[in-house]
Image: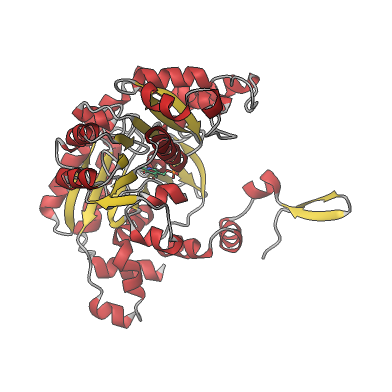
Amino acid sequence: MQELNIRPSGTEGRTYSLLGVDGALSLTQSQNSDLFAKYVNPGLKTLLSLVGFDRAFTRAQGIEIYDEEGKRYYDFLGGYGSLPFGHAPKDILEAVDKANVRPNLLQAQIPALQSALAHDLAEITPGDLEITFFSNSGTEAVEAALKLARGAQGDGVFVHCEGAFHGKTLGSLSVGGREKYKKPFMPLLSGTVQIPFGDADALEQALKSNKVAAFIVEPIQGEGGVMVPPEGYLKKARELTSRYGALLILDEVQTGFGRTGKMFACEHEDVVPDIICLAKALGGGVMPIGATVATRKVWEKAYGGLSRAILHTSTFGGGARACAAGLASIQKLVNENLPAHAAEMGEYFMAGLRTLQSRFKTIEEVRGKGLLIGLEFKKPVGGILDVLTAGAINKVSEEYFAALVAGELVKKHGIITAYTLNNPNVMRLEPPLTVQKEHIDYVLNALEHILAGNRGFFSLAVSALRR
Ligand SMILES: Cc1ncc(COP(=O)(O)O)c(C=O)c1O
């Protein structure tokens, strides 16, 4: 490796070659990339390079990101939904700064800002959702919900959906719906039952034939490929779970906080779950934070009383800075009425995408709600080119066709997008909620350019492999 900006320092006779923050910030892209391959994840580095996702970005503000040559990009990936206001939002950063005078982490005390954030969450979440457990990520919010449900119900299985994504820790994975992520880690949590998403009859059957602790479901499956269930599904799920004595856990880690055009996606059907899982946008793109909000009734059953008060805890969960980011994010969402803006921009975006779909048959489907949009491409067939490239094309194309289009978007048009985790043939379009029509028009034009340029699957794949 080339000489790096190494700053030696010694401790008890041993010398470490440390990079430190200054060293890290002065790495070139190729040095950074080599270190990633060596110390983080070599396979992921190869995958990212293959689809052209290995650029060096040096500055970001709002929806705009700049590379080392000063080229501007639009971020339509939005941190998988965790950038509701884009990058480096001034008001959220200032709120975190303001909270710096308080101890950030001081366990075994009443924490500085947690109660206020729990209050505001109780205020904005639907119905009688009231008590919050704080963590640091989406998967932790789900783990907390599963434990809470088991604790409250005493026993029973978890019913979950095909194609679901709830995170990658063991508990969340156990209620996930993609074999690829689960198989290498078997056996997972026992006592889970998988049913098709959007199928109320299958849910009723599962509730009839098992003692069910809870049904966990996303109002719209984000990573499953932006799958919108039939209208009335959530309402029916609420009705059935109540009738059979099971809890309803809604995972709104991705759909929450305005993403689908309402503050929470369950509000589209006036549904109130027993437990809601939140994360991503709550941190305003600045701090990691997860929250699991439950009704008092459920929470009391699981953790009520002195002896049960510390059955579930987290060292970092609900630190002052994270809570400051949460408080400021909620305030900004409400003050600027961003859920309504997301609804308006989403309609505009989807209308434009549907026009493209009517012109280009490569687009199989456009779906979503608000600014959680999926663009599904027709599955490519490797064929002769696969033979010519000794299988390389098939490897990339089988799963990652949307990534190839995303590669073109980033390379030729400076637009950042990606595919959905459980359905890689679907491109996710999830810009910050603050996105404007001019940005959407720019993306629509770029997609038209790529699709009209007669750059079919083969040329896209070849172009990716040549990179
Ligand atoms: C619905 C849903 N639940 C849970 C998670 C896991 O969140 P995290 O990656 O923060 O653990 C995700 C992440 O994409 C998600 O979309």
User: Which of 340 and 66 lies nearest the eye of the viewer?
Assistant: 340
Residue drawn at point x = 40 percent, y = 22 percent: 121
The N terminus - image quarter: bottom right
Q: Which percent across, then down, holds residue 282?
A: 43, 30
The C terminus - image quarter: bottom left
Residue furthest right as drawn? 13
Can you say whether 183 is above or below 152 in the image? Answer: below
Asked if residue 219 lies left or right of residue 58, the reply is left
Q: Which percent across, then down, holds residue 360?
A: 14, 56
- To which quarter of the image does residue 123 belong? top left
Asked if residue 11 lies left or right of residue 453, the reply is right
Residue furthest left as drawn? 358
Can you say whether 128 is above or below 316 in the image? Answer: above
Residue 357, visible in the rendered structure? yes
Q: Which percent across, then down, holds residue 374?
A: 25, 47
- To which quarter of the image does residue 462 belong? bottom left
Q: Which percent across, then down, holds residue 398?
A: 30, 67
Residue drawn at point x = 53 percent, y = 60 percent: 41
Residue 352, visible in the rendered structure? no
For the image, the number of numbered tags is 0
Coloration of the structure image: secondary structure
User: Which of 296 and 116 lies nearest the eye of the viewer?
Assistant: 296
- To which quarter of the image does residue 320 belong? top right
User: Which of 457 and 160 lies nearest the eye of the viewer?
Assistant: 160
Can you say whether 18 is above or below 430 in the image? Answer: below
Can you say whether 76 is above or below 326 in the image? Answer: below
Residue drawn at point x = 29 percent, y = 43 percent: 211
**On the rendering, which quadrant does ligand 1 occupy?**
top left
